[in-house]
Image: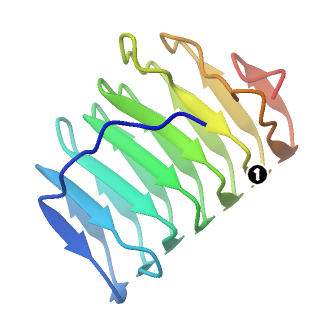
């Protein structure tokens, strides 16, 4: 599993939050045991890191600096498009489709590692191609594109 350089959190959310969470700028971290009940949107240039958090609602990021889902449970679709820094879904339970498209992270690997995904997994147009680092995902649904072998 990739160990990322530390990324500083501009805001940290703990406890339960009800309603839409839109991250306009900076990096927002969801602490372990945080629970978000509503949609989560990451705007261009912003970032979100969730470590062991639960999210009930769709997660979408378009043009984000970083999107990292590290553990935790997500109920709803996950869409990560056009990320420019780090894109990772690691050791999470996702009930819904997962789509990674057009992420360009330079030398930083795009990781989809050791997840349980109940829904389709689609990866297209990412550079570099997503990797599972030898820790396979369990996907109940079709896996396609760059993630077809996951």
Residue 118 shows up from this direction = no
Q: Which is more toward the observer, 93 or 101?
A: 93
Quarter where residue 32 is shown: bottom left
| Quarter of the figure that contains the N terminus | top right
Q: Secondary structure at mark 1?
A: strand
Residue depicted at x 18% and y 51%: 8
Q: Is residue 2 above or below residue 127?
A: below
Q: Which is more toward the observer, 35 or 44?
A: 35
Residue depicted at x 66% and y 53%: 91
Residue depicted at x 36% and y 54%: 49
Residue 4 shows up from this direction = yes
Residue 74 pos. (x, y %): 59, 65
Q: Which residue is mark 1?
A: 117
Please give left or right for residue 31 compared with residue 88 in the image. left
Q: How is the image coloured?
A: rainbow
- How many numbered marks have been drawn onto this rendered protein structure? 1
Residue 37 pos. (x, y %): 44, 81
| Quarter of the figure that contains the C terminus | top right
Please give left or right for residue 101 compared with residue 147 in the image. left
Residue 71 pos. (x, y %): 58, 60
């Amino acid at each position: 599993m990739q160990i990322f350089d530390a990324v500083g959190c501009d805001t940290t959310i703990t406890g339960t939050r009800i309603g839409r969470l839109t991250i306009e700028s900076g990096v927002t971290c969801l602490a372990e045991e945080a629970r978000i009940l509503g949609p989560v949107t990451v705007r261009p240039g912003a970032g979100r890191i969730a470590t062991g958090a639960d999210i009930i609602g769709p997660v979408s990021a378009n043009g984000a600096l970083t999107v990292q889902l590290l553990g935790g449970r997500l109920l709803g679709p996950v869409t990560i498009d056009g990320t420019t820094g780090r894109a990772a879904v690691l050791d999470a339970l996702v009930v819904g489709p997962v789509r990674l498209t057009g992420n360009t992270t330079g030398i930083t690997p795009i990781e989809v590692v050791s997840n349980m995904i109940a829904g389709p997994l689609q990866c297209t147009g990412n550079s570099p191609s997503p990797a599972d680092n030898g820790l396979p995902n369990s996907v109940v649904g079709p896996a396609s594109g760059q993630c077809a072998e996951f």
